[in-house]
Amino acid sequence: MKIMMFAHDGSLNRGCEAIVRSSASIIKEKAKKTEIYLSSGKPETDSIIPAIDKIYDGSEKGIKKYSYEWLVSSFKVKLFKDESYALGKIHQNIINRIDEADICLSIGGDNYCYGEQPGWYEIDRRIKSKGKKLVLWGCSIGEEDMSERKLADLKTFDLILARETLTYQMLKRKGLTNVKLCADPAFTMETEELPLPPGWQEGNTIGINFSPLVLKKNPESAESVSRLIEHILETTDMTIALTPHVIIEGNNDYEILNKFYEKYRDTGKVLILPDSLTATQYKGFIGRMRFFIGARTHATIAAYSNYVPTLVLGYSVKSKGIAKDLFGEERLVLDYKEISSSQRLIDGFNEMLINEKLIKETLKNSVPKIKKMSYKAVDYLQALSKL
């Protein structure tokens, strides 16, 4: 079985790295003779992932103004409202590799959460036109994200693997019959433990992750996080470890977290993890924390999978769905609008503090079941390959 993963924009987003890394590992663990190719928007960032057999440049190609391709594209769009030629040229790095695969995995877990995706729709169409199997791997999609055009694209997939029940139930309500429930593969990802930095308290360090995405959606949230940090410093003896997880230019957790670090470094109780770690190394630190508060989904998955009580600063269905599958309810997840209130953050922290033992016991019971659901995705994939 030859698999091409696409819809991946590089591993500077450690959540994307976690998806690719863990997916490749569990597929090869259960399907021994599988070859996996990765088509990446930033292939130079993906050499850290050992289970990938080949990494291809899957970046978009521009269409030079007044070139032959530009003239043909303009003619088709203006006269026939047909984008397929232009999109085919833009995404030809991916399209040119379709013939090498038996199954093509669209792996961007929440790619379908951000409006229309005509480029992905065109790639999907080309994959099916070549008779290849098409799989949407470990996705989350909110009902508010759905459109007729998106639904039409989803109907062309041979298999859609939803990583939490909220997405699964919504897609079933939309009439899709090609949907199976699994879990995010990153729950199974290995951990690499580096030496603990100066100031870290073993068993008494709380991690905080914050992102430009949340700040953009809610400009008041930064002040609320500051007040939360001050509350922790004033009422506990814990060390705070500021934890970046996405380090992309223009969307860099480290830049925003470093501002908090500079503000509170003189307390001697706040440290910041470097921006150069891999997903497994971040997981190694997160797994040794007492509590975790995070905006990035895969940073919170790193905490959950190590039974660390976690408060999620959620901004999409994925955060709510994953929490629901772990706890039976959408527990300890704050919508980005709620983060305007520092009291909601403090209340969430206090709830973790009060229920620490119960939360850990719940995670120790539910996480192994979630990991089995992660592996279930490979069973569905193998069944598809035999059709």
Image (cartoon, helix red, strand yellow):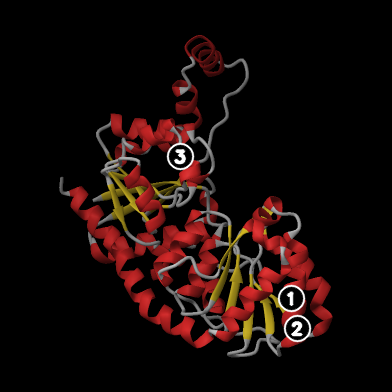
363 left or right of 384 in image = right
Identify the residue at horizontal 76%, vertical 58% (top origin): 220
The number of numbered discs placed on residues in the rendered structure image is 3
- SS label for mark 3: loop
The tag on residue 146 is 3
Disc 3, disc 2: CB below 8 Å? no
Could you tell me how far apart the alpha carbons at marks 3 and 1 are, in whole angstroms?
37 Å
Choose between 225 and 8: the one closer to the eye.
Answer: 225
Inspect the image, locate mark 1, and give the three-letter code of the amino acid beneath it. Answer: Ile
- Residue type, label 2: Leu
Q: Give SS at disc 2.
A: helix
Q: Residue furthest left?
A: 387
Which is closer to the viewer, label 3 or label 2? 3
| Tag 2–tag 1 contact (CB < 8 Å) | yes
Q: Secondary structure at mark 1?
A: helix
**Would residue 167 appear left or right of 12 to someone viewing this image?**
left
Q: 66 or 378: which is nearer to us? A: 378
Q: Residues within 10 Å of mark 3 (few under 14, many from 20)?
A: some
8 displayed left or right of 257: left
Q: Which residue is mark 2?
A: 233
Residue 298 position within the rendered picture, expressed as x and y whole percent measured from the top left: 51, 64
Quarter residue 21 falls in: bottom left
Instruction: Give the residue pinned by disc 1.
Output: 229
Please state, as top left, top right, bottom left or bottom right, where the C terminus lies in the image.
Answer: top left
> Residue 299's image quarter?
bottom right
Q: Residues within 10 Å of mark 2 (few under 14, many from 20)?
A: some
- Front residue of 375 and 226: 226
